[in-house]
C-alpha cells in the first residue's frame, strides 16, 4: 500500500470502504465485491508502475473507466486479492489535428469531451450512446462500444487508429499511430479492442475524426410489420448509402410502453412497429429531405409503411429521438426487464422477433417481450418485462431461464448472445456455453501468452476455472 | 510424400522441378527457393490433414494464393524443409445471400470471381486492385489488401465478416459469422487478417456486400502543387462524404512518364500534379455530377486546380482511370523502378513528397522520383527510377540504400514503410529496423503461442533469428 501511495500520491489511493464503494459495484448493481483499494494514477508511467507493483505482489488489477458497462466487466470478482485501477484522473486530450482528422486522448476522458473537442475544430467524432456523458474512452475501446451510428461509422474498433497500452508485465506499448493504412504484421490494437482490459490497460487512444455534419433529415415511420421494417432499411441503404447514419427499430409494444409510462413521450400515430431513420451529410446543400421523402412515398405506396413524420426542426428531431431513448426509463417504471443484447444476420430479423414472441408466450406466460434496437446492425435488445404489476426481482430463478432461452434462440439463428455490451462477468457463462471449443482455446492461448499469471481483470470474459491450460491451443489436437 | 498423396490425390501433388517452378518464385522474381513439393488440397479437411502431416514430420508449410504479392510473402525461404500449399483448387463460392449482404467464399477464388458473384445478385464487393483477375481471397485476407476504394469501404480487414482457418496444429477454427456486431471476447479474425499466413491458413471467408453502384462521376484534375491536391481531397470529403469512393494522386513527372512511354495514354493537359476523383452512389438519381462540378469550380476559383475534365461516358471514364493504371507499365518501359509503399499522416503528404524529391536530388543524383498513390489514405507509392538510359539492375548496392533512405524518411514522419503491400521476405529487415522492441515482442509472443514450432510460413514478417524467445513478452520487462 505504501509503495502504491508513493507512486500515485495520497489523492490517488482510496482505502476506506465508503470511498471504495462506488468503484466496487457495477452500474446496474448486479455485482459488488471488495477491492484492496482504489488506485487513480495520473500518467501512463504511473499506470505501468502500479501494474509492476501488483504483478510483483501477486495482486490482480481491475481497470475501470466510467463504470457504465452493463455486464459487470470493470468491477472486482469474488475471492481474489485485487485493486481497482481507475483511469479517471487521466482525462487529457493530448492533441487534436483537424488536418489529419485525428485526435489523441487519454483513457479517462468522457465520450462527450471527445465529441466536443472534435466539434471545436469543425469535425465529428461519431460514436454516440446513452451514457456518453459518463462513459470513458478507455472503457469504450476495451468494450468496442457501439450505439446509434454504427451503421455508417462502425463501432469503436473502426474509429481507433492507434492505442497506448500498459501490458500485464508493466511494459508500455506505444501504438498511437494516426495512419489509415499500415500493413506491417499483426495489427496489435485488435488485441486490446473489445477484450475488456484482460490483455492490457488502454491508457490513450488515437481516434478518427470525420467532417462535421451540416445537414440532417430525420423520420419516424410506422410500419405494418417487422419484415416491412427491414425492407425499409434495405431501401434506405440503397438510396442513401453513406448518408444513412441511423436506422433504429422499436416494436409496437415497446412504443406503447413509453407512451404509457413517460410523460410527454407519445408516438404521433399507432402502428405495429416503428423505424427511426436519419440521413446526414457534411454538405449543407445535400438534398436529404428529398431523398427521405422519396423513400417514404415508396414505402407508403408499397404498403410497407402506414404513416410517417419528418422532423421540421431540431426540436422536433429531438422529440422523435426521445421516443426511442426513453424505452429504458419506461422499463424501469414498469418494474424493470430481463435485458438482452442479441444480434442475428440481417436476413433473419423478422423471423427472430416472431420466434421471441412465441417463446415468451409459450414458456413464460404473462411476461412481455419489449424489443428495440439497431436495425441496420441486426442488433436487437430483446428485453423481457415481468408480468403486469410485478417487478424483475419477483422473477427469481425465471430470470436466468429467460436469458438462457433468449440467447439460445439467437445463437441457433447464427446469432450472438452479446452484440455490443460485451461479456464481463454477466455473460461469462454464456461464452462458455455457446462458443466452440476451438474459439475458447484460441482466446485462452492468447490470454495465457500475454498474461500468464492472470493478473489483469480476472474472471471477465474467460472464467477462472480452466482458463489457462499449460499447453495452449497450439499443442493439443 | 506417400502420406500427402493419399490425402490430396495424384493431381494434388506436384514434385517435378518444372511443375514446382511457378510456385517457388514470387511474381516479381525477387525470391526463388525450392520446395519439397507443391500440395493442392481440395477441401478444408484436406488442408487440415496436410498441416497435421507436416507438423508431425517437422516440415514447414508456405500457404500460397494467386502469388501476386509484391513482398515475396507466399514463396519458400532458403534452407528450410518446406512445402508450398496452394489453395487454388478450393475456389468455390459457397453461398451468396443478398438479403444478408454477405457471401461465403473459399480461399482460392479470385477477386474477380467474387466481384462477379456479387454483381449477379445486384450487390457490390468493393475491393479493387490491379491483380484482381489472379489474386485470391485467401491471399487478399492474409495481406489485408487495399487498392482503389479503401477510402470509402476500407481495406480487406473491414470487408471480412468471418473466417475459416486451419491452425498450425491442424485444428479448424470455424469463424464464418455474417454478423455486423459480436462483442464476445477477442475478435479472433484479426489474428489472421494481414499476418500473411504465419498464424493460420485462411481456407474460407465470409465477406460483406454493399448496394450495387448505379451512378458515377469521375474527374481528372490538374492541381498547382501537392498541397493543392490534399486540399482538393479535403474539400471533396466535406462535400461528398460517403460518395467519395476514389481519390488518387499522380505527380506531374509520373504522368509525363506515362505520356512518353505508353501509347494512347496522354493527359488532357499539363499540370504540376494530378488528382483522379470519383464519386459513386447506389442511387441512380444522386446528383453526383452537380456535386463534382461545384467542387471543381470552387477549386478553380481558389486557384488550387488549373484545369479539369469530367468523364462524359464510361469510355471516357476508363480512359481517365487508365492514365493512373499505366504507371507501372511505363516504369517497366523506362528500365524499372525501386518500389516503395509508404504511408504518412494525411497532414504530412505535401511535406513528404517535397522531402523525397530533395532526398533523391541530393543523395541519388540522376535518379528520378516517380510518385503516385492513394491520396485519401495517405498512401504513396514512392518509386525511384534509375538515371536516364539505365535499368534498375544497374543500380547495384544503391537499390538497398535508396530503399533504406525512403523508408526512414517515411518513418521519421510518423509514417510506415509498408502501407498495403505487407512485409513478407522483402520488408522483414525493415520491420526489424523500424519497429519498437515492444511491438516486436508482442508479435513474437502471439506467433510463439499459436505456432510454437514455427511451422507456418517461416521467415515472413518476423525473421527466423530470435523470433521465438522462450519466455515471450509477458515475462521480461
Image (cartoon, coloured by chain):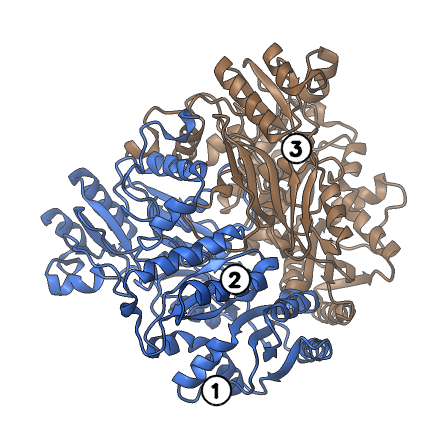
Chain colours: A blue, B brown
Name the residue located 64 percent from the left edge and 33 percent from the top edge.
B364
- Along the viewing direction, whichever of A356 and B373 lies nearer the viewer: A356
User: Among all residues in the image, which is located at the extreme bottom?
Assistant: A264
Q: Residues within 10 Å of mark 3 (few under 14, many from 20)?
A: many
Q: In this figure, which residue is indicated by the disc labeled 2? A: A355
Which of the chains bears the disc numbered 2? A
Splitting the image into 4 quarters, where does residue A247 fall?
bottom right
Mark 3 → mark 1, Cα distance in angstroms: 59 Å
For discs 3 and 2, the disc positioned in front in the rendered view: 2
Q: Is residue A95 visible?
A: yes
Residue contact between numbered discs 2 and 1, judged by CB atoms under 8 Å: no
Secondary element at tag 2 = helix
Splitting the image into 4 quarters, where does residue A117 fall?
bottom left
Q: Position of residue A82 (x, y in %)?
A: 19, 48
Q: Position of residue B56 (x, y in %)?
A: 48, 15
- Along the viewing direction, whichever of A75 and A119 lies nearer the viewer: A75
Secondary element at tag 1 = loop
Residue B49, placed above or below residue B323: above
Q: Position of residue B477 (x, y in %)?
A: 28, 34
Secondary element at tag 3 = loop
Name the residue located 30 percent from the left edge and 73 percent from the top edge.
A391
Determine if marks 2 and 1 fall on one subunit.
yes
Q: In this figure, which residue is indicated by the disc labeled 3? A: B69
Residue B452's mark?
none
Q: In this figure, which residue is indicated by the disc labeled 1? A: A266
Residue B344, placed above or below residue A320: above
User: Among all residues in the image, which is located at the extreme right?
Assistant: B264
Name the residue located 78 percent from the left edge and 60 percent from the top edge.
B219
Residue contact between numbered discs 3 and 2, judged by CB atoms under 8 Å: no
Amino acid at each position: 500500500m505504501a509503495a502504491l501511495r508513493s507512486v500515485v500520491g495520497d489523492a490517488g489511493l482510496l482505502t476506506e470502504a465508503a470511498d471504495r464503494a462506488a468503484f466496487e459495484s457495477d452500474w446496474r448493481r448486479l455485482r459488488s465485491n471488495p477491492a484492496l483499494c482504489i488506485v487513480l494514477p495520473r500518467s501512463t508511467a504511473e499506470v505501468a508502475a502500479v501494474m509492476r507493483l501488483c504483478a510483483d505482489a501477486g495482486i490482480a488489477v481491475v481497470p475501470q473507466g466510467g463504470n457504465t458497462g452493463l455486464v459487470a466487466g470493470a468491477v472486482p470478482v469474488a475471492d481474489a486479492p485485487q485493486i481497482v485501477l481507475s483511469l479517471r484522473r487521466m482525462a487529457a486530450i493530448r492533441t487534436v489535428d483537424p488536418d489529419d482528422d485525428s485526435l489523441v486522448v487519454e483513457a479517462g476522458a468522457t465520450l462527450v469531451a471527445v465529441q466536443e473537442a472534435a466539434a471545436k475544430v469543425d469535425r465529428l467524432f461519431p460514436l454516440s450512446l446513452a451514457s456518453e456523458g459518463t462513459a470513458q474512452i478507455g472503457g469504450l475501446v476495451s468494450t468496442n462500444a457501439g450505439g446509434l451510428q454504427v451503421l455508417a461509422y462502425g463501432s469503436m474498433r473502426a474509429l481507433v487508429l492507434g492505442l497506448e497500452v500498459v501490458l500485464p508485465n508493466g511494459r508500455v506499448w506505444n501504438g498511437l499511430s494516426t495512419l489509415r493504412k499500415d500493413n506491417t504484421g499483426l495489427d496489435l490494437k485488435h488485441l486490446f479492442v473489445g477484450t475488456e482490459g484482460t490483455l492490457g490497460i488502454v491508457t490513450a487512444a488515437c481516434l478518427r475524426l470525420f467532417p462535421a455534419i451540416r445537414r440532417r433529415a430525420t423520420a419516424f415511420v410506422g410500419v405494418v410489420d417487422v419484415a416491412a421494417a427491414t425492407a425499409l432499411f434495405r431501401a434506405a441503404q440503397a438510396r442513401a448509402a453513406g448518408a444513412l447514419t441511423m436506422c433504429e427499430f422499436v416494436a409496437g409494444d415497446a412504443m406503447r410502453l413509453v407512451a404509457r409510462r413517460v410523460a410527454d413521450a407519445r408516438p404521433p400515430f399507432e402502428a405495429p412497429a416503428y423505424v427511426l431513420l436519419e440521413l446526414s451529410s457534411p454538405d449543407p446543400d445535400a438534398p436529404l429531405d428529398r431523398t427521405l421523402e422519396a423513400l417514404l412515398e415508396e414505402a407508403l405506396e408499397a404498403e410497407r409503411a402506414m404513416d410517417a413524420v419528418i422532423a421540421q426542426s431540431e426540436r422536433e428531431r429531438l422529440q422523435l429521438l426521445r421516443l426511442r431513448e426513453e424505452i429504458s426509463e419506461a422499463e424501469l417504471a414498469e418494474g424493470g426487464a430481463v435485458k438482452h443484447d442479441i444480434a442475428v444476420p440481417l436476413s433473419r430479423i423478422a423471423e427472430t422477433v416472431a420466434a421471441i414472441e412465441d417463446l415468451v408466450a409459450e414458456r413464460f406466460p404473462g411476461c412481455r417481450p419489449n424489443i428495440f434496437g439497431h436495425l441496420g446492425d441486426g442488433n436487437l435488445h430483446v428485453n423481457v418485462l415481468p408480468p403486469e404489476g410485478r417487478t424483475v426481482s419477483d422473477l427469481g430463478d425465471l430470470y436466468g431461464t429467460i436469458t438462457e432461452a433468449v440467447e439460445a434462440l439467437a445463437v441457433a439463428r447464427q446469432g450472438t448472445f452479446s452484440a455490443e455490451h460485451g461479456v464481463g462477468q454477466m455473460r461469462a457463462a454464456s461464452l462458455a456455453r455457446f462458443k466452440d471449443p476451438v474459439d475458447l482455446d484460441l482466446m485462452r492461448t492468447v490470454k495465457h501468452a500475454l498474461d500468464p499469471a492472470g493478473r489483469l481483470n480476472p474472471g471477465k470474459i474467460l472464467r477462472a476455472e480452466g482458463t489457462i491450460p499449460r499447453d495452449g491451443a497450439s499443442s493439443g489436437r
